[in-house]
């Protein structure tokens, strides 16, 4: 099973200027808990922006056409399909951690998926968006409401 880790606004925004357009500490904590000690697949921009991608025992598979610094626990792949082949050889669950194109390719694969989604209840301006996901046949596993001083949000766990 592939685990997609996503925080998006109601209008599907996931990023602006190479960064998350919000700071939700509870979401960040859950993201780190879910991915600690696991395999993370992410694009090069997401890898460059997320300094902790190799911390807490994570193994990072970076989808890129560019060189990635050679470091323990970092693997480069030219395509998403190659990243999956590499990830399948590594111990741990596979977590898809963005960006936009990587999410789109993950949603298109014929493998079981678990979507760990933080849905931010706001229309947020951005230049990166999560692909339309609502039309897919998801089964809701869990739901929990949350809020902080800036946003209301829902933590959803969906499977297909």
Image: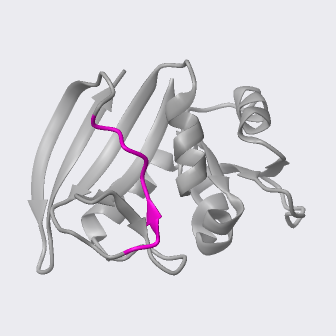
Q: Is residue 60 left or right of residue 14?
A: right
Task: Give the quarter of the image for residue 83.
Answer: top right
Work out whether residue 135 or residue 20 is closer to the camera in this orientation and state it. Answer: 135
| Residue 98 visible from this viewpoint | no
- Please state which of residues 36 and 11 is positioned toward the viewer in this rendering: 11
Of residues 1 and 57, the one nearer the viewer is 1
Q: Eyeballing the image, is 101 above or below 39?
A: below
Q: Which residues are magenta?
A: 126-134
Q: What's the residue at 60%, 47% (across, down)?
A: 102
Q: Residue at x 90, y 64 (%)?
A: 67
How many badges with numbers are in the image? 0
Q: Residue at x 30, y 21 (%)?
A: 137
Above-or-below relation of 112 to 22: above
Q: Is residue 133 above or below residue 108?
A: below
Residue 32: x percent and y percent? 44, 57
Residue 143, percent from left and from top: 15, 39
Q: Position of residue 152 (x, y in %)?
A: 11, 65
């Amino acid at each position: 099973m592939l685990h997609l880790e996503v925080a998006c606004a109601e209008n599907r925004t996931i990023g602006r200027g190479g960064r998350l357009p919000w700071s939700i500490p509870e979401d960040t904590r859950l993201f780190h808990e879910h991915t600690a000690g696991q395999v993370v697949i992410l694009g090069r921009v997401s890898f460059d922006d997320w300094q902790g991608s190799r911390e807490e025992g994570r193994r990072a598979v970076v989808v890129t056409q560019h060189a990635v610094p050679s470091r323990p626990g970092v693997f480069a792949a030219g395509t998403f399909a190659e990243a999956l082949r590499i990830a399948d050889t590594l111990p741990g669950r596979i977590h898809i951690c963005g960006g936009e194109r990587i999410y789109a390719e993950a949603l298109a694969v014929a493998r079981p998926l678990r979507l760990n989604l933080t849905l931010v209840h706001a229309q947020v301006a951005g230049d990166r968006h999560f692909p339309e996901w609502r039309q897919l046949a998801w089964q809701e596993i869990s739901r929990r409401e949350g809020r902080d001083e800036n946003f209301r949000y829902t933590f959803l766990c969906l499977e297909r």
